[in-house]
């Protein structure tokens, strides 16, 4: 089955902010209490509970911090918590907080606040709490047609309310209340998602909305998609897919609620790809997913970079060294998958279903690959470079070091993954090239190129995974610093890597002793590196990032580098 994934699916900015506020607070004061779920997603709530953020109807222990959810809280509730001696951690969405200010200001001016929203929704209750005793709630156009209000009134909306429903309610109330002030406070992200769901539903045969049934915005997305007259399924995760009902569809659209973690949506899309009648396109898409999921594409990228570095340093092409580097990288990236350390967290989250399904087989392949890699390295006389690289990988392996307390600070440092990954790639890909070409400075240049490029490449992946890493407790630079600081570092690292082959080419031009093919290769290598910088900036503000797509794109750069090195004639 072909799958089209909505661009704006997944966490909205308010949910991202709320999760980060909550998780950061839990690091300093464990046992934070929330009077209700932080967001409407059962898996996310269970993961937060493992991080020390407990949602319960019972009263918190004395002195424990109380988390104000993304939906906000009425002033009376806030005051009650403070009076009881509980410090507050405010994770209220900025758009919801703006609604509170509008309601409070209108009430202070003597106007009646009318809220268009879902009855008993926590955000609506919080708005009504800020709007004074005269505030009124309208949930349907029918209720609007019978509403009676004296004096001036202001109409506000729940931020996740249906835009069409709100417009209908506003039109009815304008006829009944000539002095009505209308503020369409529906979040633009919610409005855009609903419009996107309608448009996508018109293009496909069936729509799937990934979200918790308790999530108002997920239900709104499903309602918006149904307007196109296509079958719509609202499911919480891939385990709830009705394969039998979906078997005969050929084109499916997938979107997700604002509270749905990205990896859950990715798992649904991956499961859909395996359904239906198999065509050449289906097989091709399955292959394009299998290569990065199995880390084979990353292994090919490493082998390609090895060939590219050999060409750059003008040493004879050695396919065995490229294979050794590819096998090492395959081992390193299988052994250190981007999954949580905690077994319970990994099982609850359901992250990386491919790894969970084939874990034993993948680990068997990983250890086989590293033995073959060391064998090839020994055969080529560069085992002294590969052994430290393997040790660096083992230092990050949770199962091998979890009982070594001295190594815990190293593994948990946010930069350790990026630095050790870059170090391992540099030793195995460019290290042999540097030894073979010494004292030619181009050999050392290849080491620096690979280190900076892979360091930046790893941060690109970190940026793509930042939302899930925050929730799952995986320490990376974007999590520990901020996305903006990590992005600046990534730009600097990729920029340095891009400048290295370009500088070699310019230097060779000035000395007038470089073949045209070699010069062209340096320009193309620099250009391919700049493409990775573009991938790092892509979807900068998008709610949903697809790490698998990012990885495929970055791996393709390494593969293209190797292909160019094979196609270009070697300098005489």
Image (tube, rainbow, N blue to C red):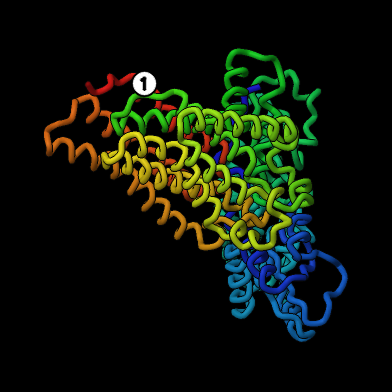
User: On screen, 153 above or below 365?
Assistant: below
Q: Quadrant of the N terminus?
A: top right
**Mark 1 secondary-structure assignment:** helix
Residue at horizontal 58 percent and vertical 65 percent from the top: 94
| Res. 251 image quadrant | top right
Residue at horizontal 27 percent and vertical 42 percent from the top: 441
| Residue 98 locus on image (x, y percent) | 58, 67
User: On screen, 470 above or below 59?
Assistant: above
User: On screen, 149 above or below 370?
Assistant: below
Front residue of 363/203: it is 363
Q: Which residue is mark 1?
A: 566
| Res. 203 image quadrant | top right
| Residue 363 locus on image (x, y percent) | 69, 35
Q: Is residue 90 visible to us here?
A: yes
Q: Is residue 339 left or right of residue 558?
A: right
| Residue 467 locus on image (x, y percent) | 60, 52
Q: Is residue 165 visible to us here?
A: no
Residue at horizontal 69 percent and vertical 62 percent from the top: 405
Front residue of 419/288: it is 419
């Amino acid at each position: 089955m072909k799958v089209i994934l909505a661009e704006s699916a997944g966490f909205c900015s308010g949910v991202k902010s709320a999760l980060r506020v909550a998780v950061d607070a839990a690091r300093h004061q464990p046992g934070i209490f929330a009077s209700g779920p932080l967001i409407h997603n059962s898996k996310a709530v269970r993961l937060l509970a493992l991080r020390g953020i407990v949602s319960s109807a019972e009263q918190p222990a004395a002195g424990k911090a109380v988390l104000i959810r993304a939906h906000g809280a009425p002033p009376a509730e806030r005051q009650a918590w403070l009076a009881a001696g509980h410090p507050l951690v405010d994770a209220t969405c900025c758009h919801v907080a703006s609604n509170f200010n509008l309601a409070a200001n209108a009430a202070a001016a003597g106007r009646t606040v009318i809220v268009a929203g879902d009855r008993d929704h926590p955000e609506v209750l919080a708005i009504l709490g800020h709007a004074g005793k005269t505030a009124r709630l309208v949930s349907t156009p029918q209720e609007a047609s019978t509403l009676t209000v004296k004096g001036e009134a202001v109409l506000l909306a729940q931020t996740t309310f249906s835009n069409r429903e709100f417009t209908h309610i506003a039109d009815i109330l304008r006829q009944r209340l000539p002095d009505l002030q209308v503020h369409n406070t529906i979040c633009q992200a919610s409005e855009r998602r609903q419009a996107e769901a309608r448009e996508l539903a018109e293009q496909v045969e069936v729509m799937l909305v990934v979200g918790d049934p308790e999530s108002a915005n997920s239900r709104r997305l499903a309602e918006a998609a149904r307007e196109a007259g296509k079958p719509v399924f609202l499911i919480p995760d891939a385990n709830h897919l009705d394969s039998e009902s979906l078997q005969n569809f050929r084109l499916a659209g997938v979107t997700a609620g604002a509270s749905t973690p990205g990896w859950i949506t990715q798992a649904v899309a991956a499961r859909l790809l395996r359904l239906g009648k198999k065509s050449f396109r289906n097989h091709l898409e399955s292959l394009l997913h299998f290569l990065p999921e199995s880390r084979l594409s990353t292994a090919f990228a490493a082998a390609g970079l090895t060939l590219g570095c050999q060409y750059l340093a003008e040493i004879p092409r050695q396919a065995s060294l490229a294979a050794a580097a590819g096998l090492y990288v395959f081992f390193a990236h299988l052994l250190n998958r981007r999954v949580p350390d905690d077994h319970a967290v990994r099982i609850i989250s359901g992250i990386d279903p491919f790894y969970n399904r084939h874990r034993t087989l993948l680990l068997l392949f990983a250890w086989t690959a590293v033995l073959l890699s060391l064998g090839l390295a020994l055969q080529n006389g560069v085992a002294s470079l590969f052994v430290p690289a393997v040790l660096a990988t083992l230092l990050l392996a949770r199962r091998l070091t979890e009982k070594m307390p001295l190594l815990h600070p190293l593994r948990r440092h946010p930069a350790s993954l990026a630095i050790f990954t870059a170090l391992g790639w540099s030793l195995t890909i460019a290290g042999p090239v540097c030894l073979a070409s010494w004292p030619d400075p181009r050999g050392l240049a290849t080491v620096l190129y690979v280190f900076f490029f892979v360091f930046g490449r790893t941060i690109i992946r970190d940026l793509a995974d930042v939302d899930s890493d925050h929730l799952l407790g995986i320490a990376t630079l974007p999590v520990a610093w901020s996305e903006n600081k990590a992005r600046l570092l990534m730009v600097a690292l990729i920029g340095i890597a891009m400048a290295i082959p370009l500088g070699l080419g310019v230097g060779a031009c000035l000395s007038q002793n470089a073949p045209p093919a070699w010069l062209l290769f340096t320009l193309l290598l620099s250009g391919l590196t700049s493409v990775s910088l573009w991938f790092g900036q892509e979807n900068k503000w998008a709610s949903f990032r697809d790490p698998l797509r990012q990885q495929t794109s970055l791996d393709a750069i390494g593969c293209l580098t190797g292909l160019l090195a094979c196609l270009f004639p070697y300098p005489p």
